[in-house]
Image (cartoon, rainbow, N blue to C red):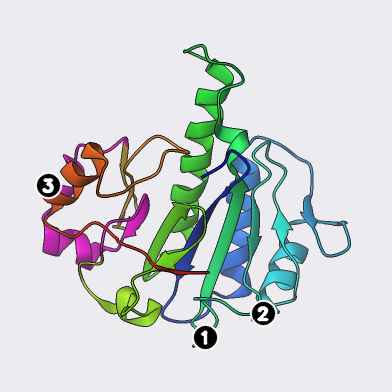
Amino acid sequence: MQDYDKIWTGYIFESKPTVNDYQLLFERLLEYIKNDRQIKISIDQTKADSAEAAEFIHKDNSGNIRPPVELDISIASSKEGRGLLLDPWVPHLRSLTWIYRLKRADDGEGSAEIERLRREFIDIHALAAEVLEPRWAFGRRGGLAIGEDESIKELSETTTPPLYEYNYFRPETVDALGWDCVLTAPAWYVDKLDSGGVFLAVREPPKQCSRGVDTCVEVADHLGIPLATPERYH
């Protein structure tokens, strides 16, 4: 994997979020980053407020929403194109950011700016899970992918989905795994959300997970779920 790769996340819903859901998300994002700038609609570089951005993304237009954050995160829910989230189509939201935003500027340790960006990246995704309460959310470096014999719909419906680099476990999943077990997982980030679920990042972004990484195996073993072995890419 190269430094110009992306980190993708997918939020899977039982039913499509409403305009009010999206508006609340964008309002919370702007509140989090303490910035009064407007949201950018990338299809034509239009600037929009939270309500306008919510209407746009709810219509499934072929464009992205870009909150004014340094990470250059883009958010979309388009039905156009092809990919894991589109065939067969499931209600979803997807986002991406570039790897290089989360890499150190040099070989030295302790870059406060990079550490801040990494934390904000995770906080923003935890916030999205908090507001939208997806059925399941997963993310990884290099593209959304699942196992050859798996489907997004099946993975979103199972109580104990496999472990990805970035995960949202809904309350039923946390109940099945055990609250103490989930909250004490030896992961880089574990956050119990007010909505009842948990957002968990296994490793510090933009690091990957694989069977060859001890931390990832340790977290999967701790939770008692398999580590994702994705083969089919978005």
For image coordinates 33% across by 55% down, the residue present is 164
Residue 43 in which image quadrant: bottom right
- The residue tagged 3 is 222
Graded by Cα atoms within 10 Å as few (under 14), some (14 to 19) or many (20 or more), the crowding at tag 1 reads: few
Q: Is residue 224 above or below residue 160?
A: above
Image coords of residue 126 (percent x, y): 44, 49
Dot 3, how many residues are within 10 Å of its Cα: few (below 14), some (14-19), or many (20+)? some
Tell me the residue that label 2 is attached to: 81
Identify the amino acid type marked 3: His
Secondary structure under tag 3 reads: helix
31 to 233, vertically: above or below: above
Q: Nearer the viewer, residue 216 or 16?
A: 216
Q: Which residue is mark 1?
A: 87
**At 55% from the left edge and 81% from the top edge, which residue is drawn?**
86
Range of magenta residues: 162-188
Asked if residue 193 lies in the magenta stretch, the reply is no
> For residue 171, which quarter of the picture?
bottom left
User: How far across and down, in percent of the image, does residue 85 sit?
Assistant: 51, 76
Query: Is 222 situated left or right of 144 in this image?
Result: left
Cα separation, mark 1 vs mark 3, equals 33 Å
Q: Marks 2 and 3: CB-CB under 8 Å?
A: no
Q: Earlier in the sequence, mark 1 or mark 2?
A: 2
